[in-house]
Amino acid sequence: MSQPPPPPNQPPSGGFGPPQEPSSAYGYPQQPSGQPGEQPQQPQQPDPLSKNPPSSAQPPQAPQPGYGYPQQPAPGAGAQPPYPPQAPPSYGYPQQGPPPYGQPPAYGQPPYGQPPYGPYGQYPTQPMANAGQSGSGNGSGKILAIVAAVVAVLLIAGGGIWFLAGGDDDTEAKGDTKGTSEGGTNGGTEGETGVIKAEFAWKTDPPKVDKEDILTDVPGTWFVGKNIVKTTTSSTTAYDMDTGKEAWSIKMPRPKSCAAAHGMSGNKTVVQYGGRCEFVMAVDLATGKQLWKKELPSERATPTEFSYTEIAVSGNVAAVSWIGNAVGYDLTTGKQLWQQEENSECQDRGYSGGSQLVAKVECGFGGPQKVQGVGQKGEKKWEWSAPSGVDVLKVLSTDPVVLGVNAGGESSIDITDLMVLSDKGKLQHKISISKDRHNMGCRGISLSDCSGAVVDGDTLYISSQPHQGDADYGRTSEIIAFDLTTGKSKWLGEPTEEGQIVPVTVENGSLIAYEIPGYDRPGKVVRVDPETGKASPRMEMPSADVKREYDMASGSDVRPYWKDGHFFLVNNKFYASAGLSDLAIVAYH
């Protein structure tokens, strides 16, 4: 998967300006102003992913002329009013052009590393009933220790505490041909379209977490037929969506935050397991049968070697990457298709699946980066070379390819721009992103975990950052739609009643979003018109269950899912201490 690195005289990383400054009209459209927004194991055979065989090596691709080209012309510059409260920033709509590259952050921006928000984007000053805190009886010392550990993990992973919206692994067979596993066109229904007066249906208890682990992440949620399938710390288990009754379960120890594919292909997916997460298993999610299992190639055998594994499936290929190595398998048979070249200067650092397999390639630690399309036999289909100093952080979609990158922002973990590529890997548009205005729910170092961003065809849906609303209730947010064919914003849609709203998935061409509950007000599933951004009720949560819904939604990694008239809140982070992980799944219909 690698090419020779560029010549050694390439400019060093960095040197690009911070995110553009906010303009006025906080959360609402602006008036028109010119625009409407130890070494790896040696492979047994020649590596089919290698792009630099001795006889046909390709020359390095020259840097692109100017970061982010082509750019949209900025509206006419004008004097900006003082930053809030009378003129807060506009979300998603055209802003003034970014400052010159290398310019220091604007006065008044938050200091580096300061967390701007608490659970699901709220500022810490808002009253919150943290799930599991009341009546836990654990003592302040234990809680502080746990909180300190959680904060350390989040800082290392580059994530924040945010209510992560929709589609982390929400993929069905028909969704394999569009987008990635994040949100997108996966999870819709062909049935009822009227407003549903929901009732609490069922719940599952949290899995057991080893006390030595303190906490563990358990990614992996899929929908197949009438079942919702979820990984736990000891199994992969399917539940009937109507009743919650267990349909099937495969036992597999998964105690150390093992990974799972962010989607499936032809009802098949891959899950990591083992005492060190050293094994991967392919599972037929329709039947609950194991297809094959493999031990990942390793010579180091360290306890943490596989802690940062990424798995992606696309077509009949399963790709796995971790620190220092990468391997590809036939998804049906388990036959090894490739393994990372030993001592290769350029290495695969992550994969994203869906309608096509996309690889992030890095040449030297912290060196030049590339993004490549990978064929079903491991061959390179296309390649995009990131400009010097640009770090590819996320893949929001693989059809079209939408990348989240950092180009010299305040923090190396922040997405400062979205790059939209053509099917041949050519840069089409650059969309400037500000952490003060946009909220995509990105977390950790995984290449495919921006579950608050939903891509459907030519449209990207994200949330605005929460901000003070007009009512006394508290903070509110909006849905922002971007046209990926132009790189401009289309509209900014408000919730049906003031409060926070996050995108979930797409149903019959319309966005499905979740209006987050308050401590005394139930949440709501809404349909958002793709042309106007107007929201209308789709499912109203029961008032009698508001405490359970609110406590669940307040979790640090709880995600909403919508499937065939059913709504689920699914927890992906569990704690060893009792009271901090009350439930695993809560279902409504």
Image (cartoon, rainbow, N blue to C red):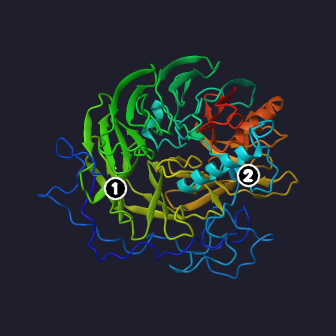
Give coordinates of residue 302: x percent, y percent: 38, 44
Disc 2 to disc 1, C-alpha distance: 36 Å
Residue 534 visible from this viewpoint: no
Secondary structure at numbered mark 2? loop
Q: Nearer the viewer, residue 513 or 54?
A: 54
Where residue 540 sits, quadrant-wise, is: top right
Which residue type carries mark 2?
Glu
Give coordinates of residue 176: x percent, y percent: 44, 36
Residue at 42% x, 72% y: name it. 13
Q: Earlier in the sequence, mark 2 or mark 1?
A: 1
Question: Quick check: 330 above or below 104?
Answer: above
Q: Is residue 439 left or right of residue 224?
A: right
Count of labels shown? Answer: 2
Question: Quick check: 274 above or below 246?
Answer: below
Q: Is residue 345 left or right of residue 585?
A: left
Q: Which mark is residue 494?
A: 2
Give coordinates of residue 453: x percent, y percent: 57, 49
Where residue 207 sits, quadrant-wise, is: top right
The outermost residue toward the left is: 55
Secondary structure at numbered mark 1? loop
Q: Which mark is residue 424?
A: 1
Which residue type carries mark 1?
Lys
Residue at 46% x, 32% y: name it. 174
Label 1 Cα neighbours within 10 Å, binned few <14 / some 14-19 / many ≥20:
few
The outermost residue toward the bottom is: 79
Q: Nearer the viewer, residue 427 or 372?
A: 372
